[in-house]
Amino acid sequence: MRSVVVVGGSIAALTAVETLRMADFDGRITVLSDEDLPPYTRVPLSKGVLAGRETADDVVLAPLSDEVDLHLRTPATGLDTDNRVVLTPAGPVRYDGLVIATGARARRIGTANQAERVLRSYDEGLRLRDSLAQASSVLVVGGGFLGMEIASTARALGKDVTVVDLAPPLDRLLGTAVGGHVRTVAARAGVRFVLTHGGVRLLGAPFPTGVETADGQRFEADLVVSAVGDVPNVEWLAGSGLPVAGGVLVDERCRVSPHVVAAGDVAVFTTGDGALTRIPSWTNAVEQARAAAKALLHGDDAPAYRPSRYSWTEQFGLDVKMVGAGDPQGEPVVLDGSLDAGRALLAWPDATAPQTVVAVNHPTPPAKLKRLLARPAMEAAAC
Amino acid sequence: MRIVADRARCEGHGLCADVAPEVYELDDDAIVVLLHETVPPELERKAEGGARVCPVAALRVEA
């Protein structure tokens, strides 16, 4: 293998490049990114960038080595796996090995004539920052990590903030105990929550200024932001023959087909029970990209990908770090501190074999949180 | 090569130490600690790799 092409310009792409270099791959590495900026972190977009405290200099990651050929503003438009060529507006790019890391874009619920506000890229972050500065009231549609972080930043700027969702925000991610705690803190900070039955329709054009619920209730605000999930960028793979099912389908080593691997938000894989799943998070992009690059180099001898299932959010003065299965059910066992005191280390379903551990404003390093998790017998034997 | 760590920016996610434990550690408050004042040449690629996975861009590489 003399040349590897990495399609994508975010953390999965970057990690694949670094993993190849750390493994002393000395062939040519080409990165094709449709972004204007060199690889950056999206994590501060909903926080420092949205608040106007941070700009590109703060979010751009340590620059790639000169040995790597980075092409910005170069989207992949097609893939010919027979001839091993990625098509771009600047011409075809040949590869021996291909890493697909095209990520995902914000899901939209508006109509074609609506300039819906979303937050996914740096540019979208800047536009939202400017709109937010002009607004006195904000309506956030979707109460996941992103929606709640936007709500937190907007509230800290003194905006009147309402979060609209189908279910109590954060419960599906953090479980009812921690989700409820975060909502209590957010409500105390002045955030209003609206639960709807059925989806909402965005009102107003070109910029939405309200939503209408399925039962006809209307809510209005100067600024409406949609934070309703993401859509994998797979359109460029149409006709390539690669398996696409709500993402690019990868095996246990993140391989797609001979000479092709995929990682990050674009990758979908089969879980134990046969269901297809994506894990669109920073940690998972890093972990999949490491596995994918190693599989490209070493095939079956590469270690299989094992998600650590580590995620985090910061909002309303709370720093929440979670490892293990999402949406832990019922009341946790308290390993240290307490939620009422504002600092807690919690485990589910019990302290002897935790499946989920959450730290709220608790300085336990993530590596230690992971060690608190009960490991399946086979995995433990392999370590 | 030198790595510059912004300890005020560090949030203790520990990905640097996952990728390059020879270069990065977390202290008891989960804040990054650099193990080398100057990165030895044989660890330079690992040091760069660890710096680039920081989700809050708290690590800078200086040639």
Image (spheres, helix red, strand yellow):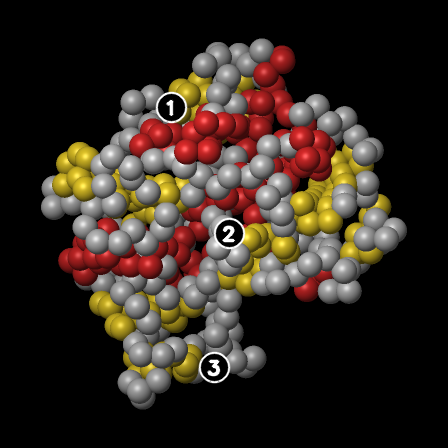
| In-front residue for pair A256/A320 | A256
Using the rendered image of the protein, determine whether residue A122 is visible from the camera's viewpoint.
no
* Label 3 sits on residue: A205
* Label 1 sits on residue: B26
Q: Position of residue A297 (x, y in %)?
A: 72, 32
Residue B35 relative to residue A18: left or right: left
Disc 1 from disc 3: Cα separation: 49 Å
Q: Position of residue B47 (x, y in %)?
A: 55, 22
Q: Provide the secondary structure element on which disc 2 rests.
A: loop
Amino acid type at circle 1 is Leu
**Residue A290 has which mark?**
none
| In-front residue for pair B12/A293 | A293
Disc 2 from disc 3: Cα separation: 41 Å
Residue at image point 62% right, 47% down: A251
- Report whether mark 2 lies on the same chain as mark 3: yes
Q: Give residue A165's quadrant in the image.
A: bottom left
Residue at image point 57% right, 52% down: A269
- Image quarter where the N terminus of chain A lies is top right
Amino acid type at circle 3 is Ala
Residue at image point 36% right, 59% down: A144
